[in-house]
Amino acid sequence: MNPNTLSRRNFLHLSAATAAGLILPASASGQGQASSGRKTDFQIACMTLPYAQCSFQRALEGIHDAGFKYVAWGTRHRQPNGESLPVLEPEAPPSTAKEFGVRCRDTGLTPLMMFSGIYPEAKNALEVLTNRIRQAAAARIPQVLTFGHTEGGSRPIWIERFRKLGPIARDHGVLLVIKQHGGDTGTGAACADVVREVADEGVKVNYDAGNVMDYLNLDPITDIQSCAEEIRSFCIKDHRNFPKDQDCGPGFGEIDHYKLLQPVAFTGLTMPLCCENIFAPLVERPTDASEIDTLARRAREFLEIVIRGLHT
């Protein structure tokens, strides 16, 4: 038998996979997939964001007990006196960030990402983002996450500032990643367009499928084909349009995570998957920390199953 000839069974399997979107047709290859032939090392993390009503330490303990090895810092946490304060102030010295990094590792978690907490077009964004990069380096956090205003920003300012920030990020061993957040950078395609114009390896794309579907009501499975080569991490959140327009945890929504992760499943890169939303749609969010732990565990297990399937 000619080794270049497909058997009928293999042909049917290949056709079915292509129809399901698990294998892209030739016309969608290239820019549509980022592939080195080696498996992507997906690092499944939980953000402390779902634990905003708890202390930062309780968030770390819950995430660890839910079976995670990795964590991403949220934005604010409830203090013992009931006050909600930022995890890390923008002007905090790198030494403070280092202490938070030690707390994570002492709890058994490796921190992978932190929010910048500022829009790139803000007047003081260059100063704040520079200090965030220094904080991340001190805490040994590989990525700093930023995104634009939902009503849009100034592209020329973005390009100018990211070209200055890229070398700073690289010098500190940190990656600055941009995710979708509505407005004129509400798609992966738009974010990738910015990254390609900046043309600095210190600035890449973070993909947030839930935001693409939520803010613009666009199909993230189609959108991700345009930016797969620039993606270096994900903010994991799902979304439903029915029976209610609502973000939710992975596997609770309408986004097919097999199709979402397939274009970057064989990059050979290390790629954080940071669970930003783990909650069930329609029902009230739990206030009991142990119930949040249960949802965190479920999100991790779901993503592990998806990745195992894609890598088989």
Image: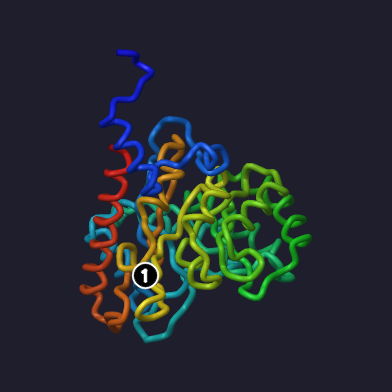
Q: Position of residue 73 (x, y in %)?
A: 43, 63
Q: Position of residue 259 (x, y in %)?
A: 39, 51
Question: Left or right: 104 with respect to 166?
Answer: left
Question: Left or right: 161 with respect to 42?
Answer: right
* Residue located farthest toward the front when viewing the structure as drawn: 8
- Decide which of 202, 21 is in the foreground and name it: 21
Above or below: residue 76 compared with residue 186: below
Question: Left or right: 159 with respect to 266?
Answer: right
Residue marked by disc 1: 56
- Decide which of 65, 149 is in the foreground and name it: 149
Locate the C terminus and report the quarter of the image it occupies: top left
Dot 1 crowding, Cα within 10 Å, few <14, some 14–19, many 20+: many
- In this orientation, does residue 57 appear? no
Q: Position of residue 147 (x, y in %)?
A: 59, 64
- Decide which of 121, 79 is in the foreground and name it: 121
Toward which corner of the image does residue 242 lie, by quadrant? Answer: bottom left
* Residue located farthest toward the top when viewing the structure as drawn: 1
Q: Position of residue 179 (x, y in %)?
A: 55, 60
Q: Residue at x 29, y 61 (%)?
A: 299
For the image, the number of numbered tags is 1
The colour scheme used here is rainbow
Locate the N terminus and report the quarter of the image it occupies: top left
- Decide which of 45, 299 is in the foreground and name it: 299
Q: Residue at x 47, y 49 (%)?
A: 140
- In this orientation, does residue 142 appear? yes
* Residue located farthest toward the bottom when viewing the structure as drawn: 82
Toward which corner of the image does residue 59 lie, by quadrant? Answer: bottom left
- The amino acid pointed to by label 1 is Phe
For mark 1, give the secondary structure.
Answer: helix
